[in-house]
Amino acid sequence: MKRELIKLDHGIILDWIPPRSSVLDLGCGNGELLSTLVKEKQVQGSGIEIDQQAIHQCVTKGLSVFQQDIDMGLSEFADKSLDFVILHQSFQQVKKPDFVLKESVRVGKKVIVGFPNFAHYKARLQILFKGKVPVTQALPYEWYDTPNLHFLSILDFIGYCNRKGIRIEESKFLKSNAIVIVFPNFFAETGIFLLSEEVRK
């Protein structure tokens, strides 16, 4: 696949994952990211998804995907048994994000988390001037049909990682098809983080 055809967020994740890594994609959806990783990085990849239709789309792509609720944990996986666990655009949708991330860090040597930034300036302006729950490119759902259960900002997540002893190894912030460098909590629509468990002395 030509690099220019790969979505910017997927390209960032590709850059972080070495070839032939073992990867578990939690809430993998239709398998677009996982399929790209298999093709471009030859990863040993599998996914977990709860939606039957999405699983069918994964299977037609030749992917190994299990139907499971990731809020129930990852008890079938041993500690540090995988090189990478991915929670991209699914972290804000789970019922128990604290538990799911704790399990991801336990199972994966590294964890990649990506989510929409609810503190993006367009979302703030819609609340301020319209008095309504925001609908933006990164948050395209109306309040009554959104899959998002938790509304967090980039600063919220950084503070959370600091409190929980999770090391942020790298981070990227995006707006449309561009990288945001300045004031990402205000200007970025999406944050993507490469995490590892902090070794406490």
Image: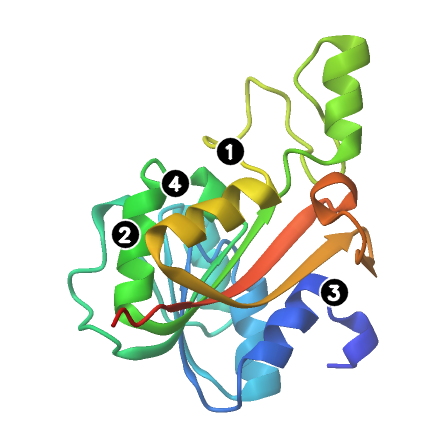
Distance from the alpha carbon under mark 4 to that under mark 2: 12 Å
Say which amino acid is labelled 1: Asn
Residue 81: horizontal and vertical position, in percent? 25, 78
Residue 59: horizontal and vertical position, in percent? 44, 66
Q: Residues within 10 Å of mark 4 (few under 14, many from 20)?
A: some
Please name the residue that numbered disc 4 is placed on: 94
Distance from the alpha carbon under mark 2 to that under mark 3: 28 Å
Tag 3 near tag 1, CB within 8 Å: no
Residue that protrudes farthest toward the top in the picture: 131
Q: Residues within 10 Å of mark 1 (few under 14, many from 20)?
A: some
Q: Which mark is residue 68?
A: 2
Q: Looking at the figure, which quarter contains the N terminus?
A: bottom right
Secondary structure beneath label 3: helix
Distance from the alpha carbon under mark 3 to that under mark 4: 24 Å
Going 60% across and 58% down the picture, which residue do you hit?
192
Q: On screen, 67 above or below 117?
A: below
Nearer the camera: disc 4 or disc 2:
4
Does residue 103 appear to the left or right of 52 in the view shown? left
Q: Earlier in the sequence, mark 4 or mark 2?
A: 2
Please name the residue that numbered disc 3 is placed on: 8
